[in-house]
Image (cartoon, rainbow, N blue to C red):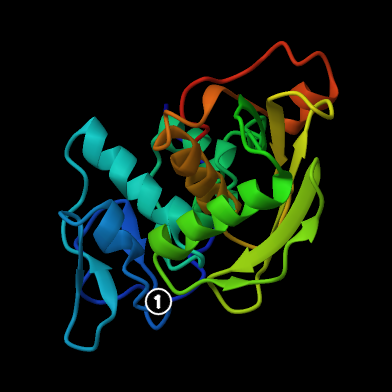
Amino acid sequence: MTMQNFMPEPTMQHPRNVEGPFYVRAGCCMSCDVPMEEAPELFAYDSGNHCFVKRQPTCSQELKQAISAILFSESDCIRYRGDDGSVLRTLAELGLRKQCDRNPPADAAPLWRNYVTFEATFDSAANMSESLRRHLATHCYAPVKFKDINGSKNAASFEFAWFEHYFHPVQIARENPGDSTWLIQLPSHVPVGLLAVIRQVDEWLTCNATEFHEIRWYTEADWRGSKLSLFTRSPW
C-alpha cells in the first residue's frame, strides 16, 4: 500500500545518511547510543559523534531494529520518509506519528500497553519499587535520576528520568491487600520516552522469572473496560 499524502520534512538531514526511507536529522543527535544499541548494523557516528544511517534495512528483522531505534530514542532525530503503509501504521500505533514525513493511515492510533499485572511474593510495594529502581539504574542507556519512593506495604510510587527533566511516574500496588497479585501503572501520556519505560519494566519482569509470574499487559482502555484483551508477549 502506497500513501499519497505528504508532510514536509522538518529540517535538513545529515549529509552522510544513505539514500532510503530512514534518516537522521542534521544537528539533532545527542550521542545517546540508542541507535547503536538497537540497530548497530544500520547506524554509525561521524567524526563529530553525530549519528547517521549508514545502511537501510534489508529484511524484516532489520526493519524492526530501525523502528526500535526511533522508538527508544528520547528525541525525534531519527525519522521515516518512506511510503510503506504497513510501516507508517506501525509507527503511528507506537505513538511515532510525528516521526513520519508522510501521513500514516488516519485510523492508526497509539496502542500503548501501560498497565501490567503479575504474581510476586514481595513483602511490600516499597521493596518492589527499590528492586525496579536498581534495574533501571543498571540497564538504562544513560545515568538515571530518581525521586524518592512514596508509599507503604500495599502501594508505592516514584519517578525517574534519564533525559533532562522528563520524569516518568511509576505506580505499584497490590490488586487486593494481602494477596500476591500486583499492578504497575504507567502514565498514558508523558512528554517523551513512554515506550522505552514500558520496555524497561517488561525486561525487569521477564528477566526475573523466579520472582514474577503470570505477566499480563493491558492498554488503558482494556484495563478500564472489559479487560478482555491482554498481552503475554512484550508490549510493543
Q: Which residue is mark 1?
A: 12
Q: Position of residue 45 (x, y in %)?
A: 20, 75
Closer to the camera in the image, 51 or 228: 228
For badge 1, the amino acid type reads Met
Quarter of the picture holding the N terminus: top left
Q: Quadrant of residue 161?
A: bottom right
Closer to the camera in the image, 118 or 56: 118
Closer to the camera in the image, 36 or 161: 161
Q: Residue at x 55, y 41 (%)?
A: 94
Within 10 Å of disc 1 (Cα), the crowding (few <14, some 14-19, many 20+) is few
- Position of 97 with respect to 83 (left or right) is right
- Position of 172 with respect to 79 (left or right) is right
On screen, residue 82 above or below 162: above
Q: Residue at x 50, y 65 (%)?
A: 76
**SS at circle 1:** loop
Q: Position of residue 194 (x, y in %)?
A: 60, 52
